């Protein structure tokens, strides 16, 4: 069991009030708060070690380079990758997916080829493939969701053809918290010689992830959703795939030699890290991983299961509220999406804000999924390791208040 009182003390932003109410932060699927350990690490970097990496032959630069590459090694271990060469730093999940679409996609996708996605995807795993498909004359296909928002996998073979060149899908839904059966899906894709890209933005902050065990070919995630600073992200890809991919961006750092006629690119992973990277933020990502390891990913996942099931049971009892997602008790990330009959989700969020409860309202960058579920927007409460049952109780009280005011 997590010591939530102790955990909450690690997050300075939670020690304040909003509208004279205790702040309850429930927008963790959008971004998470930062522990003192991460904040202090970034401050220390700027105060003691700030310099550019891989370039300077002086102590500050060597120290900055060490800390930057140490963070890469922490990421490698955290996700179970085999080599640090397979860890590419980016600005986030969106840039990681765009990197694959631009570099791998332009080289491997041709007219008439099929790219397989799902109706559950975040826009960042739809739009890059739409653009690539239009450019190349390729075809997008989607695995549908059922009425509860789970992928329809009863006959998964039907989605693969000889023209399928990539499967790109979300690991955990940012709208419903549904955890997809990734190993089963990836195994089926590989039986059809189809590589798989996983959007891990909503999985890696909450559960243990091992890319080798999952056997994915690409894995993309963001640092800011796992206690790290904004502007940090990771693309994992198998070394043999990365070796064959051209650079995504070009310029300084990612070169070995430039002549007037030609350029020789750096080895992995620097080949894909053009220009000055967000060095302090990456060091902060390393500190976030240290913090998560100190708490324990298994403990975090168990805690979230308790909180989300408690929240589901409480919210479902409120008259006039519709909760989206599977009704049966399953393992799911700490996400509860709901609507109130006759009330726009933005109005719900506004009333909850007055009660000190911060949630997200809208389409959550997943419009195809919401339309499949028969709605255009929901209110979404998303939980993390520093949330507890008192936070859920304050949420429920605020929802009841919103119903009285708005209806």
Image (spheres, rainbow, N blue to C red):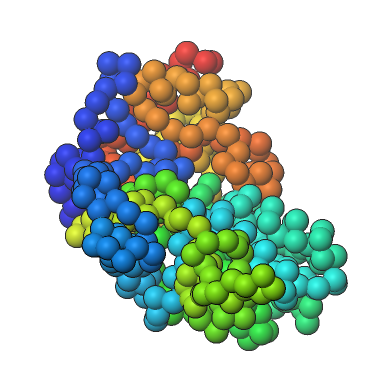
Side of 75 where 402 appears, left or right = right
How many numbered markers are drawn?
0
Which of the 4 quarters of the picture holds residue 208? bottom left
Quarter of the image where the N terminus is located: bottom left
Identity of the residue drawn at 75% across and 56% down:
131
Residue 94 at x, y = what percent? 56, 54
Q: Is residue 62 above or below residue 360?
A: below
Q: Which of 33 and 302 is in front in this view?
A: 33
Is residue 170 visible in the rendered structure shown here?
A: no
Q: Is residue 50 above or below residue 264?
A: above
Identity of the residue drawn at 39% across and 18% down:
354
Which of the 4 quarters of the picture holds residue 291? bottom left
Residue 184 at x, y = what percent? 54, 76
Identity of the residue drawn at 32% across and 16% down:
19
Side of 192 where 17 appears, left or right = left
Identity of the residue drawn at 50% across and 41% down:
337
Q: In this view, does 222 lie above or below 358?
A: below
Side of 178 where 287 appears, left or right = left
View extreme (top): residue: 405
Q: Which of 29 and 103 is in front in this view?
A: 103
Q: Nearer the viewer, residue 254 or 138?
A: 254
Is residue 249 visible in the rendered structure shown here?
A: yes
Q: Which of 282 and 176 is in front in this view?
A: 282
View extreme (front): residue: 260
């Amino acid at each position: 069991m997590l010591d939530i009182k102790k955990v909450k003390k690690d997050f300075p932003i939670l020690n304040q009030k909003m509208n004279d109410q205790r702040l309850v932060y429930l927008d963790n699927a959008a971004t998470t708060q930062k522990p003192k350990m991460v904040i202090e690490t970034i401050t220390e970097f700027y105060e003691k070690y700030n310099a550019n990496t891989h370039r300077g032959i002086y102590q500050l630069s060597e120290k900055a380079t060490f800390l930057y590459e140490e963070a890469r090694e922490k990421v490698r271990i955290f996700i179970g990758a085999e080599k640090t060469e397979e860890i590419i730093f980016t600005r986030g999940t969106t840039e990681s997916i765009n990197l694959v679409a631009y570099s791998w996609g332009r080289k491997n996708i041709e007219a008439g080829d099929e790219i397989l996605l799902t109706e559950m995807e975040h826009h960042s795993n739809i739009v890059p493939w739409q653009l690539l498909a239009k450019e190349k004359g390729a075809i997008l296909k989607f695995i549908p969701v059922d009425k509860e928002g789970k992928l329809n996998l009863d006959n998964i073979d039907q989605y693969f053809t000889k023209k399928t060149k990539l499967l790109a899908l979300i690991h955990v839904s940012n709208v419903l918290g549904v955890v997809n059966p990734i190993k089963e899906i990836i195994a089926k894709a590989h039986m059809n010689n189809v590589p798989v890209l996983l959007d891990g933005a909503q999985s890696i902050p909450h559960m243990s992830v091992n890319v080798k065990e999952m056997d994915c070919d690409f894995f993309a995630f963001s640092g800011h959703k796992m206690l790290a600073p904004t502007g940090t992200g990771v693309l994992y890809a198998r070394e043999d795939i990365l070796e064959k991919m051209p650079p995504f961006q070009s310029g300084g750092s990612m070169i070995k030699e430039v002549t007037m006629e030609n350029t020789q690119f750096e080895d992995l992973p620097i080949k894909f890290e053009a220009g000055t990277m967000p060095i302090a933020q990456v060091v902060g990502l390393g500190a976030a991983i240290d913090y998560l390891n100190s708490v324990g990913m298994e403990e975090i996942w168990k805690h979230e299961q308790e909180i989300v099931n408690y929240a589901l049971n409480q919210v479902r009892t409120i008259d006039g509220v519709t909760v989206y997602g599977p009704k049966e008790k399953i393992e799911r990330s700490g996400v509860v999406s709901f609507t109130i009959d006759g009330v726009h989700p933005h109005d719900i969020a506004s009333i909850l804000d007055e009660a000190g409860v911060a949630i997200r309202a809208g389409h959550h960058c997943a419009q195809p999924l919401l339309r499949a579920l028969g709605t255009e927007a929901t209110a979404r409460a998303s939980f993390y390791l520093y949330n507890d049952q008192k936070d859920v109780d304050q949420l429920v009280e605020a929802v009841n208040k919103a119903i009285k005011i708005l209806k």
